Image (cartoon, rainbow, N blue to C red):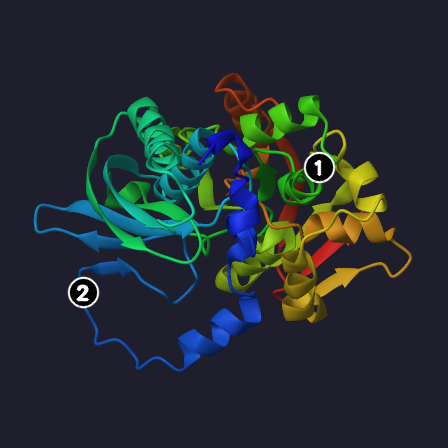
Amino acid sequence: MNIHDIRLTSLAHGGGCGCKLAPSVLQQLLARQSAAQPFAQLLVGTETGDDAAVWRLEDGTCVIATTDFFMPMVDDPYDFGRIAATNAISDIYAMGGTPIMALAILGIPIDKLPTEMTAKILAGGAAVCATAGIPIAGGHSIDSPEPIYGLAVIGTCKKKDIRRNSEAQAEDAVILTKPLGVGVYAAAFKKGALSDVAYADMIGSMTRLNRVGTKLAADASVHAMTDVTGFGLLGHSLEMARGSDLSVILNAADIPVLPEARQLIEQGFLTGASGRNWASYGHEVRLDPGRPEWQRQLLTDPQTSGGLLIACRADRAEAITRQIVEDGHPYARVIGRAESGQPVVTVIG
């Protein structure tokens, strides 16, 4: 079997964070679960759809635990491993923590994928973990109909440094650290319509670690954080609005976007997850009906290993944004604000 003749994306019905269940489906499933017994040491659970669970140990140290895995959105196995690992580790950074180790999650159709390709997936994940300064200390693998890879990641932090998605404050500024559009780019790639330059931009964005989240958590003027993944910018902004019981206003003109995203959307390169996202939460978004369709599609586009969405004190927003840019995120922008009011998302500009 010639590995150069195998397209990983052809072996999967979806890819990246576009594989996630629609927000409405996930809400229904969680609502049917029995209420958890109260655990005083469980500081963050499932109540607000946060990025990871947090457990306080007796000495006051907090342990952060998360898991994330998906099917390939690119054909290069090494890149697939890098993207999946970066995406999984991001949940630790989004909570304000420092990752300490990971466990690999691997599902491979052993009759369709040569061992050397699987080895490259694992090598890509290991390379990102090495950059993050953590080991892959174990894991689990199965024979599955479609290729799946990801990590369970453990991190730590101090209690005061935990940053939930539900603690934004009225008059906070809202910052986004990465551009939107990787779902659109992936859709174009799968159909052979993505340029080499655009592919490099997509890979560069999805493999850039969100480690700045750990630094930001040490700043008391940063009130809330989450990462933007499968539910799109609108979906994760809405989670922040609901959890904080505030209204979030986004200025469309300030939202960073990958260079070719608009053009590709207008050419019809969309993900199914974008439509599912809008169907799930569109009734809670105030969007001018005259706004161009490409913009709505971009705001619901599922982001794989997307940027951090940050709520911080307004008078510190510009300085914090500069810090994020200096840390290696050139697209970081102030994109909106939080206000007292109904927990919805409004798009202006």
SS of the residue under disc 1: loop
Q: Nearer the viewer, residue 33 or 128?
A: 128
Q: Return the x and y of residue 297 as percentages of the image width and height.
A: 75, 52
Alpha-carbon span between mark 1 and mark 2: 52 Å
Q: Position of residue 171 (x, y in %)?
A: 60, 47
Q: Residue furthest front?
A: 1
Residue 169 shows in the view: no
The residue under label 2 is: 40
Picture quarter with the C terminus? top right
- Residues 188 and 22: in front is 188
* Residue drawn where x is 31% and y is 62% of the image: 45
Above-or-below relation of 47 to 162: below
User: In the rendered view, would you say 327 is above or below 240?
Assistant: above
Amino acid type, callout 1: Gly
| Vertical side of 54 occupied by 222: above or below | above
From the viewer's perspective, tell me whether residue 190 is left or right of residue 322.
right
Amino acid type at image mark 2: Ala
Query: Does residue 295 appear left or right of residue 123 in this picture?
Result: right
Give the x, y percent position of residue 259.
75, 29
Q: Earlier in the sequence, mark 1 or mark 2?
A: 2
Instruction: Give the residue displayed 43% in from the left and 61% down from the top.
Output: 49
Q: Residues within 10 Å of mark 2 (few under 14, many from 20)?
A: few
Q: Nearer the viewer, mark 1 or mark 2?
A: 1
Residue 212 occupies which quadrant of the picture? top left
Q: Who is closer to the viewer here, 199 or 323?
A: 199
Disc number at residue 192?
Answer: 1
Mark number displayed over residue 144: none
Quadrant in which the N terminus is drawn: top left
Q: Give coordinates of residue 88: x percent, y percent.
A: 38, 43
